Amino acid sequence: MPPGGAVTALIETHDLGIDLALPGGLISALLPGPAPKLNILRGVSLSIAAGESFGLVGESGSGKTTLARALLGLIAPSAGRLEFRGQPLDSAAARARLRRDAAMMFQDPIGSLSPRMRIRDLVAEPMQIHGMTRSAARARAAALLDRVGLPAAIAARYPHELSGGQARRVCTARALALSPALVVADEPTAGLDVSIQGEILNLMADLREAEAISFLVISHNLAVIRHTASRIAVLYLGTLVETGPTAEIFTRPLHPYTASLIASEPDPDPRRRRADLAIRGEIPGLLRRPKGCAFHTRCPLAEARCRSEAPALRPISPGRSVRCHFAGP
């Protein structure tokens, strides 16, 4: 929960839809009419509170990265609306202002850093872009590197000279350069040893509490989401299927897809028998999105109604919603 228990929305989406143009090639370019588009996200409504850590989970191809890009102001919505601090992001200028208050921690930290720049200049770069002098930006960069637990000598190194954990901390320092209100962390522990993963997650928790930063954590690792997020949203084929408090969802998942994701996580206790809820088949392509419930082609509980009627996202309890015909209190 946000510090002090306050529930103040920092960023919200209302029935957000994202369409992206398909690469059509020469034949498509010669044909009249607009280029064909692919519907990536459909009717996504969620709210991230100020100072909250919010988790986003789903398989590859579910639309997580597209949603994150929209929340960073990098993609204009095709439908619905996006609000930041209660103000609509309905223009390119408004989305540009959002990018001053939002930052990204990339999945591949070393790959996201220019190999030709020293660490102090990489961390200082966002500040200089926004008008800070080089000397002031470097001074703040040094303070930020210290804030994320890196020694001063790191500042003179290049990215290829860093370990995975050090690179992750550098990217965290760079993300903090402009004192953002929102940080999108894409797989923040990918490729790290377990002990280093814990250090990075603890650092994020410390920053959230000390700086009142909101984190959107995107991860396939449900253990990471369980550890970091107070609330989560489950995305399937561009549609939210379940949202709610993390503890409630992990204890009692309501949507079959959520239950399958949780059941697929490894259990270190060999005495526990896991229910056979494995997800069967591949996630359908967006060009062949199933009619009715998008998950019915893989759902072990699907009935005739699921194949023809798309369920709505229904509130089940305060802060808890699910998109399923049969899920209930």
Image (cartoon, rainbow, N blue to C red):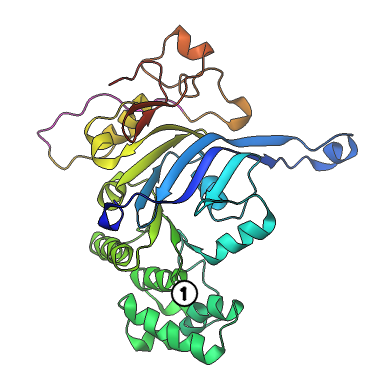
Is 69 placed left or right of 36 in the picture?
A: left
Rendering coords of residue 14 (x, y %): 53, 38
Q: Main secondary structure of the magenta part?
A: loop
Rendering coords of residue 223 (x, y %): 27, 47
- Location of mark 1 (residue): 177
Is 287 placed left or right of 310 in the picture?
A: right
Q: Quadrant of residue 317?
A: top left
Q: Nearer the viewer, residue 23 or 134?
A: 134
Q: Residue furthest bottom?
A: 135
> In this picture, which residue range is highlighted in magenta?
270-281
Secondary structure found at label 1: loop
Q: Nearer the viewer, residue 118 or 216?
A: 216
Q: Is residue 28 visible?
A: yes
Q: Quadrant of residue 183?
A: bottom left
* Vertical relation: 190 (above or below) 319: below
Rendering coords of residue 107 (x, y %): 45, 58
- Residue at 27% across / 66% down in the picture? 206
Q: Residue furthest left?
A: 271
Q: Quadrant of residue 322?
A: top left
- Residue at 29% across / 53% down in the picture? 228
- Name the kind of residue labelled 1 in the image: Ala
- Residue at 43% across / 22% down in the picture? 298
